Amino acid sequence: MKSFFQTFVMSLIVCYVIFFFVGGLIFENLWALLMLIALVISILINQFIYLETKIEELETRIKTLEKPSEHED
């Protein structure tokens, strides 16, 4: 739980700094706001897809490692 709060506070500070300096430019233009939201969503989706691919690779590796031990019994 402590690491979650540390990450949350760090991201809150970074967001505050970004919005303080760039927020006026982003919120004045609808297209810039739309692109910012799309960027954040695409980064999140891309990370989930990457993690799903890594999990599938690990599952196949585990299955191949377990197969020889099943035949020895």
Image (cartoon, helix red, strand yellow):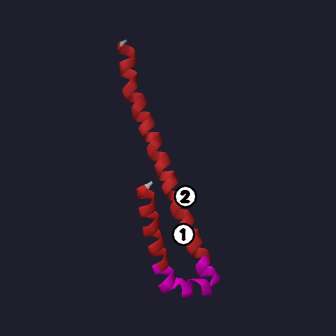
Q: Which residue is mark 2?
A: 45
Residue 29 is inside the magenta segment: yes
User: Looking at the image, which residue is at 44% across and 45% down?
Assistant: 54
Against 19, is 66 above or below? above
Decide: is 71 above or below 36: above
Mark 1: few, some, or many residues within 10 Å (few <14, many ≥20)? Answer: few
Above or below 24: residue 67: above
Question: How far, Cα to Cα, is label 2 from label 1?
Answer: 10 Å
Residue 26 location, x and y as percent? 57, 83
Numbered disc 2: secondary structure: helix
Residue 57: x and y, percent? 43, 40
Give the magenta part as a residue range: 17-33
Picture coordinates of residue 70, whole percent (x, y): 40, 17
Is 30 placed left or right of 54 in the picture?
right
Which residue ends up furthest to the right in the rendered image? 30
Circle 2: residue type: Ile
Q: Is residue 32 found left or right of 59 in the rendered image?
A: right
Q: Which mark is residue 61?
A: none
Q: Nearer the viewer, residue 72 or 11?
A: 11
Task: Residue 11: give x, y in percent of width and height.
Answer: 46, 69
Q: Residue at x 50, y 47 (%)?
A: 52
**The N terminus - image quarter:** bottom left
